[in-house]
Amino acid sequence: MSNKVFFLDRDGVVNIDSHYTYKSSEFIFRDGIFTLCKTLENQGFKIIIVTNQSGIGRGYFTESDFKKLTLWMLEEFKKHKIKILDIFHCPHSPDSKCACRKPKPGLIHKACSKFKIEIDKSWLIGDKESDIKAAEAAGILNTILLGSNEDHNVSISNAKYVLKSLHECNELILSK
């Protein structure tokens, strides 16, 4: 059985990006994330989170800190009856030569290796152009850049859609 997947970036999509978040007390879910994820599940999507976590490579927090926060976050999704299929993260700093740090597609490739994913039916929501570039490099054509037109230079974004909120994302998915 193959899966159509909705890839979500973490910081900036799942939660408000407050730079190097690694404590549950500092983790604030974005307005609309639970509604969106429930819609995605109802539309037959599996949900995978792909996230750069350079705070590990920079020494701001540890891999153990990241795992602890991740377990807490998954429990919060579970409370809302949402299943996150998996989470893939890059712990490396921006100057690393790794293949997993977005805009490289390594995290998405890892997910595709682990799960039978229909990449042509999959989507990605990110809040940075590096998310969109990683999706494109992996063959995902349905991309959403989350933010406002003021936040992004839309004329140079390769995202299929630029939306201002997760509520707009939810409306888009329901219209497809």
Image (cartoon, rainbow, N blue to C red):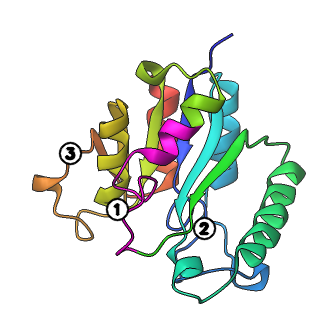
Q: x, y (%) of residue 81?
A: 85, 43
User: How far across and how far down the image is residue 159, in percent?
Assistant: 27, 44
For residue 112, above or below residue 146: above
Position of 145 with respect to 117 (left or right) is: left
Q: Amino acid at mark 1?
A: Lys
Q: Position of residue 56 (x, y in %)?
A: 59, 78
Rendered residue at 70%/51% (across/down): 34
Q: Quadrant of residue 29?
A: bottom right
Residue sticking out furthest to the top? 1
* Extent of the magenta region: 94-110
Q: Residue at x 34, y 62 (%)?
A: 128
Q: Mark 2 highlights which residue?
A: 15
Q: Earlier in the sequence, mark 3 or mark 1?
A: 1
Task: Tell me the residue that label 3 is attached to.
Answer: 158
Q: Which secondary structure dominates the residues rendered in magenta?
A: loop
N-term mark: 2 or 3: 2
Quadrant in which the C terminus is drawn: top left
Left-right relation of 158 to 86: left
Q: Secondary structure at mark 1?
A: loop
Residue 100 lies within the magenta run: yes
Reading the chain from its start, which is encountered first: label 1 or label 2?
Answer: 2
**At which x and y percent is residue 93?**
45, 75
Q: Quadrant of residue 21?
A: bottom right
Tag 1–tag 2 contact (CB < 8 Å): no
Q: CA distance from mark 2 to mark 3?
A: 23 Å
**CA separation, marks 3 and 1?**
11 Å
Residue type indicated by callout 2: Asn
Q: Residues within 10 Å of mark 2 (few under 14, many from 20)?
A: some
Q: Which residue corresponds to mark 1?
A: 128
Q: Residue at x 49, y 67 (%)?
A: 12
In this view, 145 is above or below 5: below
